[in-house]
Image (cartoon, coloured by chain):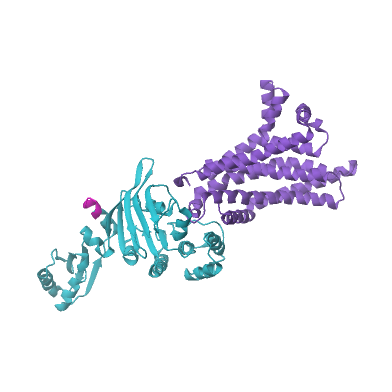
Amino acid sequence: MDIRNVLLIMRKEASESLKNRWFIIYTVCFSVLALLVLLFSTMGGEIAGFSGFGRTAASIINLVLIFIPLIAVITGGISISQERESGTLSYLLSHPIGKNEVFVGKFFGLLITIWFSILLGFGIAGAGVAIMGGQGDVTGYLLTVLLSILLAACFLSIGFLVSVYSGKASKAIGISVFLWLLFIILGDLGIMGTTVVMDLGIKQVFALALLNPAEVFKIASVLVLSPRFEILGPVGVYAVRTFGQQGVFYLLFSIMILWALVPFAYAYLVFTRFKKEEI
Amino acid sequence: MISVKDVTKKFNNVVAVDSVNLHIQRGESVALLGANGAGKSTLLKCILGLLDYEGLIEIQSRNTGENLKLSKSLIGYVPQEPLFYDMKTIEILSFFGAIRRADKSRIDYLLELVGLKDHQNKLSYELSGGMRQRLSFAIGLLSDPLILILDEPTSNLDASGREDFLKLVKQSRENGKTVLFSSHRLDEVYYLSDRVLFMKSGRVVLDVKPEKLMSSLGIKVKISFKLPESFIADAMAILSKEGFTNVSRNGTGIYLEVDESQRVLPLEKLMQSKIPIDDFLIQESSMETVISQIEANGY
C-alpha cells in the first residue's frame, strides 16, 4: 500500500465533503444546536447555578446520538456504492492506484471530515462555556468528545460495510437509514421488549446493550459525566459492581473500538476481494 | 509492446472474449473494429487490468496481472464516456496528475495542448462533451505513457469535437505513442491506424492493413460519373476496354464498382481519353457494409 495514494484519496474525499452542501448543512445544524444547548444550560444555571462542561456535554450527548450516527452511516453507505454506480470508481482504478488504497483513503478522508464537524460543534459549545466562566468536569467533557468521535467511526465503519454490499447508492441509503433507526430509535425499545418477553436477567440485559454501539456510547458517556452510576439503573449497578467503574469504561471503550474496526476490516476484505468486473 | 496470449473473458456463461491472441509493436496504431457486443471494450478492459480474464497479457514483456500498477502507469486510457468528479478542470488534472506522479509543468503543458487553459476553472459538468473528452485525453497523457488505449472515444462527440480530438490522437501517434483504439467509424480507422483488427463474437477474425480492409473482404468502391449525354457511351466503352466490369449507365452518367486499390483508376482513364467530367462521386463503404460482408464471408 502506497501511503501517498492513500493521502491523495483522503484529501480528495475531505475536500469534496467540505464542499458538499448536505455536509455543510449538517455541520451548521450540529454547531447551532450545540450552541442552543449551551444557552439553555446557561438559563438553567441562573436558577440552579451554572454547571459548566458536564451539563453541556450531557445535553450534547442526545444530539450526538441522533446526528452523528445518521450522518456517519449515510456518508459511509454512499461512499463506495455511489462511485461504483456512477462508474467513477472504475475510471479511478484504471490509473495506477490500488483498491486497498482507495478504500482506506476514502474511509479516513470521510472520518476526518466528520470528526471536523463534531469538533467544531463541541468546540463552539466548549468555548462558550469557558467564555461564560462555567466550570465543571473538563476531563469528562473531553472524554465525551472522544467517545463521540469513536461513535462516528463505528457508524462510518458500518456504513462502509453497507456500501460494499450495495450496488446502488439509493439502496445503500435505504439500508443505512434502516440501521440507524434500528440502533438509535428501536435500540432501547428492542432491549426493553426482549427483556420483558424473554424475562432476561441483568447480566443478559447488559450483554444485549453491548451489542449496540449507540447504547455503549450512551452508557460510557453517562459513566464519564456522572459519578453516580446508579442513574444507569440496576444494569449499571451490576456492571460497575462486576467490572469496577474504570473497568466498565474500558470495556465499553474497547467495544466501541471493536465496532469501529470489525465492520471496517470486513468491508475492506470484501471490497479488496471483489472481482474486477464487480467494481 | 502489448502481447495478448490466448485471452478469454466470460461473464457467467457468456463468452465476451474468446481465445484472443495478438501482438502490438511499439509505435503501432491499431484499430479494433466490430459490431456492438463483439468484445472490443471487454478486450481493452482486460488489457487495462479492469477485468479478470483467463490467459496472459504482457506489456513490455511483463505480466500485467502480476504488475498491475506498473502496467497501468504505462497506459493512458480514454473511456467512451469520461466520468469525472464534480471538481474544477485543473483540480481533476492535479488529482490524477498526483496519482500518476506528473509535475505541475506537465499539467500546464497538457491544458495548453488540449485547449482547456481558458476553461481550467470550470467545473467538470460545465464542460461540453468535446471538452470533457479532451480533458480525459489530457489525463491519459499525464504520465507521458507509452501506450494510449481509447475506447470509442469519439462516439459522443459532434463533428467539430471529433475532428479536434482525432487531431490530438494523430499528434500523439506521430510522437511515437503506441495507440490501441476501438471505433465504429471507418474514417477514423483510415485516419489513425496502420493496422485493423476486426472482432466478431469475441474473436479477432481479421488482422489487416487499413488499405487492405475492403479488398480482403471483397468490398468494392462505388463510383458515379456525371457526364455530358453525348460522351456516356464512349466512356462506358473505354472503361469496359480497360477491364472494368459492372459498368452501367445511370440517369446522368455512368456507375461502376471497383476494388479499393483501383478507386482512382477510372477517373484517370476517362481524363486520359479526354472525356469531359461534370462531376463524380466516390461512395465510401460504411461500417454496416463491412460487418455484413464479414458475416457473408463466414468469419
| Residue located 57% across and 40% down the image | A266
B297 is within the stretch colored magenta: yes
The one of A23 and B172 positioned closer to us in this rendering: B172
Q: Is residue A259 left or right of residue B169?
A: right
Look at the image and give the colour of chain A. purple
**Highlighted range, magenta:** B293-299
Q: What percent of the width, then of the height, locates residue B30? A: 34, 61
For this rendering, which residue is in front, B236 or A254?
A254
Name the colour assigned to chain B in the rendering.
cyan
Q: Position of residue A140 (x, y in %)?
A: 80, 42
| Residue A141 picture quarter | top right
Q: Residue at x 87, y 50 (%)?
A: A133
Count numbered badges in the picture.
0
Q: Is residue A148 above or below residue B35?
A: above
- Above/below status of B260 relative to B84: below
The residue that appears at 66% across and 21% down in the rendered structure is A198
